Image (tube, rainbow, N blue to C red):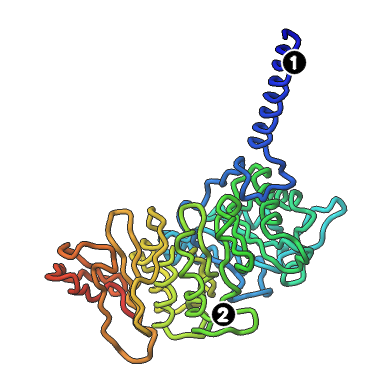
């Protein structure tokens, strides 16, 4: 009897040890079988608590970028009031790359950037701005320069040496790479560099990064590239209204530190009317999108400057609550959008997608407001205070906040 009792104790001890091992395995899952977004140890980098603002070279200059262009844009951002309005990142997109050195570190194209990117970054920082750069998760960038695949930690270390504050990371020449793992690898490399570097993921939305990237990147592209047209698809690019329709349903996934990115602004590039550009800028602000200008800042018109420097509209984008606005009423060409604000109010956008003038009504229930609430309204586009509105019924309308 005693021997059986001891055997029972031994068996229980073995079972307890097995249970303990299983519990430990649950706490420390195998990183080789766990998707990066599911790893409980992964932490966000803490950057981009508001949608990033700045300027990027691609939409206007494409591969015709060089040291003088970038310095000139930095100078203009300071001189024309954009820095004061919140624009801070100066980002060199594709085509800055030279070759890799004997140790595998990336170098800059010294024909385009004769003083080097460290000196250019120092110049941008001397203006009180931040320095951004571009690379790709594949073997080559979209412009055919060396990509970062296989050199992630080296590239991140080089960027840190150059004083980089922002990395846009594209998705050309990636073959069969898994996007989540590829972006997590560069995310980890940036963290290991010892420098806080905002991570802009440009995967075009193919693998639905809004479902997995909130602790990997600070912003992720939700569509193919933007083009300076109003709507439709053009090869791999999309018009503005088409991008809006793809980005709008993703509003639940955006928030401080992780933003849906419908791509850079085309405001001022000449393909649309000023009215369409106002709508473009207003919609990006409503969607809490990064506001990354993409025009030639040195030659922009007064109308373009007025759009890009409308601080009331910028404040909607930069609201600390970090909620992405979305469509609450859809009557064909006539739409009402609502964005909750940190002070408890609402920003409303009235969007007429048609070609003829129309009256649009924003009804209290659609905005999530009680029917008898008194409101003080401000037209942000025209920068004027409207009359106080006190609906007598739930169907009485607030007439306009923005209307294009």
As helix, strand or loop, the secondary structure at mark 1 comes to helix
Q: Position of residue 272 (x, y in %)?
A: 47, 85
Q: Earlier in the sequence, mark 1 or mark 2?
A: 1
State left or right for residue 223 relative to residue 268: right
Q: Residue placed farthest to the left in the image?
A: 392
Query: Residue 217 or 151: which is nearer the viewer?
Result: 217
Q: Which residue is mark 2?
A: 238
Q: Which residue is mark 1?
A: 7
State left or right for residue 135 relative to residue 129: right
Residue 306 appears in which quarter of the rendering?
bottom left
Give the residue at x 82% y 58%: 100
Q: Position of residue 187 (x, y in %)?
A: 65, 51
Determine crowd level at label 1: few under 14, some 14-19, many 20+ residues with C-alpha closer than 10 A: few
Quadrant, the C terminus = bottom left
Which circle marks residue 24 in the picture?
none
Give the residue at x 29% y 69%: 366
Q: Alpha carbon of mark 1 to alpha carbon of mark 2: how far?
A: 72 Å
């Amino acid at each position: 009897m005693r021997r059986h009792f001891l055997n029972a104790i031994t068996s229980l001890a073995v079972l307890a040890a097995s249970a303990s091992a299983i519990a430990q395995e649950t706490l420390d899952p195998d990183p080789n079988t766990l998707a990066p977004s599911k790893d409980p140890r992964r932490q966000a980098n803490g950057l981009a608590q508001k949608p990033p603002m700045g300027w990027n070279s691609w939409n206007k200059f494409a591969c015709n970028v060089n040291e003088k262009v970038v310095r000139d844009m930095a100078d203009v951002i300071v001189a024309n009031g954009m820095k004061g309005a919140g624009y801070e990142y100066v980002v060199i997109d594709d085509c800055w790359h030279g070759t890799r050195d004997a140790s595998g570190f990336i170098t800059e194209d010294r024909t385009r950037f004769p003083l080097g990117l460290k000196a250019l970054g120092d110049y941008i920082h001397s203006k009180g701005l931040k320095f951004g750069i571009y690379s790709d998760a594949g073997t080559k960038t979209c412009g055919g320069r060396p990509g970062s695949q296989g050199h992630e930690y080296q590239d991140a270390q080089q960027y840190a040496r150059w004083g980089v504050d922002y990395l846009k990371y594209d998705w050309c020449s990636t073959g069969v790479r898994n996007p989540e793992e590829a972006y997590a690898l560069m995310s980890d490399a940036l963290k290991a560099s010892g420098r806080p570097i905002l991570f802009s993921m440009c995967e075009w939305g193919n693998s639905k990064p809004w479902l997995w990237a909130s602790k990997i990147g600070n912003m992720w592209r939700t569509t193919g590239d933007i083009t300076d047209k109003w709507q439709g698809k053009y090869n791999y690019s999309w018009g503005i209204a088409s991008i809006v329709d793809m980005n709008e349903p993703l509003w639940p996934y955006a928030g401080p530190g992780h933003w849906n990115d419908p791509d850079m602004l085309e405001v001022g590039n000449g393909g649309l009317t000023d009215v369409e550009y106002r709508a473009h800028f207003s919609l990006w602000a409503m969607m809490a999108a990064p506001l990354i200008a993409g025009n030639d800042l040195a030659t922009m018109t007064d109308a373009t400057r007025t759009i890009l420097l409308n601080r009331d509209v910028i404040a909607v984008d930069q609201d600390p609550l970090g909620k992405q606005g979305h469509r609450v009423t859809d009557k064909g060409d006539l739409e009402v959008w609502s964005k909750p604000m940190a002070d408890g109010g609402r920003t409303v956008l009235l969007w007429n997608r048609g070609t003829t003038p129309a009256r649009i009504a924003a009804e209290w229930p659609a905005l999530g407001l009680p029917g008898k609430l008194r409101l003080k309204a401000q037209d942000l586009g025209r920068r004027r205070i409207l009359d106080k509105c006190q609906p007598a019924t739930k169907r009485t309308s607030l007439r306009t906040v923005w209307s294009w």
